[in-house]
């Protein structure tokens, strides 16, 4: 298990400019991006025991992060 934050700019480095533009122009993308960052921060804080949570809750957060990342990728790949 990695304790490295999974920031969108690191996940999709060739899409940074597009993500920035979409955050400004597409409210849905902006909400997805913000939700991803919030969930990602919660996962990272749980993994590093800054804010420990039950294992099942952490697994569910990771699944939510993956689903958000997939939805974000779908938008990026179509833009």
Image (cartoon, helix red, strand yellow):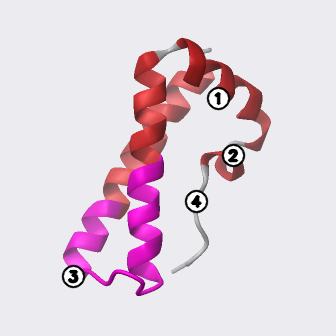
The stretch in magenta equals 37-61
Which residue has dot 2 on it?
9
Q: Are marks 4 and 3 in contact (CB under 8 Å)?
A: no
Helix, strand or loop status at disc 4 = loop
> How dense is the environment of label 2, judged by Cα within 10 Å: few (below 14), some, or many (20 and up)?
few
Q: Is residue 44 magenta?
A: yes
77 to 55, vertically: above or below: above
63 to 71, vertically: above or below: below
Which residue has dot 1 on it?
19
x 35%, y 80%: residue: 51
Name the dominant secondary structure of the magenta segment: helix
Which numbered disc flags the more N-terminal residue, 2 or 3? 2
Disc 1/disc 2 C-alpha distance (Å): 8 Å
Which numbered disc flags the more N-terminal residue, 4 or 3? 4
Q: Is residue 66 magenta?
A: no
Which residue has dot 3 on it?
54
* Drawn side of residue 69 relative to residue 19, left or right: left
Which numbered disc flags the more N-terminal residue, 1 or 3? 1
Disc 2/disc 3 C-alpha distance (Å): 28 Å
35 to 43, vertically: above or below: above
Q: Are marks 1 and 2 in contact (CB under 8 Å)?
A: yes
Which residue has dot 4 on it?
6
Helix, strand or loop status at disc 1 = helix
x 40%, y 21%: residue: 28
57 to 35, vertically: above or below: below
> How dense is the environment of label 3, judged by Cα within 10 Å: few (below 14), some, or many (20 and up)?
few
x 40%, y 30%: residue: 31
């Amino acid at each position: 298990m990695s304790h490295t934050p999974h920031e969108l700019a690191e996940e999709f480095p060739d899409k940074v400019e597009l993500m920035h533009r979409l955050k400004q122009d597409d409210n849905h993308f902006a909400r997805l991006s913000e939700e991803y960052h919030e969930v990602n921060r919660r996962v990272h804080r749980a993994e590093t025991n800054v804010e420990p949570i039950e294992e099942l809750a952490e697994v569910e957060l990771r699944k939510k992060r993956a689903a958000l990342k997939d939805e974000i990728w779908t938008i990026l790949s179509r833009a």
